Image: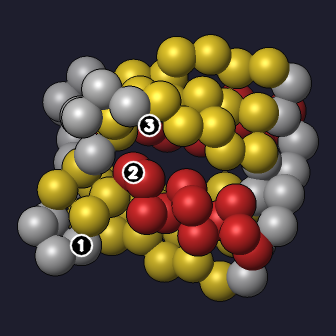
């Protein structure tokens, strides 16, 4: 399964991609969504740090939250992330 998430800009897309998946270790880093405020998403990582990512709009936040929920619940794993300008393609399996 895959989805494409539109972020506010290229920087936010790169940040989201690097925060949720570490390619070298083939490891999913996100552990939960702490808060959602309009188009801003606050996520918690395995190291207990919290990070804010600004997406394009509230629809994108909903799409991301729905997609990532099964990963947080450990039903799926993230297989890859690809950043193309302000878009992040996320594949889970």
Depth check: give the residue in front, 73 or 23.
23
Determine the residue located farthest toward the bottom in the rendered image: 84
Depth check: give the residue in front, 51 or 2.
51
Task: Kindly report the distance in space between the C-alpha atoms of the residues bearing marks 2 and 1.
Answer: 10 Å
Residue drawn at x 24%, y 49% as measured from the top left: 28
Q: Which residue is mark 1?
A: 23
Is residue 24 shown above or below 3? below
In percent of width and height, residue 79 lies at 25, 64
Q: Are marks 2 and 1 in contact (CB under 8 Å)?
A: no
Say the numbered circle drawn on residue 92. none
| Quadrant the C terminus occupies | bottom left
Say the numbered circle drawn on residue 68. 3
Is residue 25 shown above or below 20? below
In percent of width and height, residue 33 lies at 49, 23
Q: Which residue is mark 2?
A: 20
- Rendering quarter of residue 73: top left
Residue drawn at x 30%, y 26% as measured from the top left: 48
Depth-wise, is mark 3 or mark 1 nearer the camera? 1
In percent of width and height, residue 74 lies at 18, 30
Residue drawn at x 86%, y 24% as measured from the top left: 38
């Amino acid at each position: 399964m895959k989805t494409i998430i539109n972020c506010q800009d290229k920087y936010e897309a790169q940040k989201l991609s690097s925060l949720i998946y570490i390619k070298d270790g083939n490891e999913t880093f996100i552990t939960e969504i702490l808060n959602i405020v309009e188009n801003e998403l606050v996520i918690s990582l395995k190291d207990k740090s919290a990070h804010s990512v600004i997406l394009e709009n509230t629809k994108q936040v909903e799409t991301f939250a729905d997609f990532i929920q099964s990963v947080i619940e450990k039903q799926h794993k993230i297989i890859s992330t690809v950043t193309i300008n302000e878009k992040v393609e996320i594949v889970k399996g």
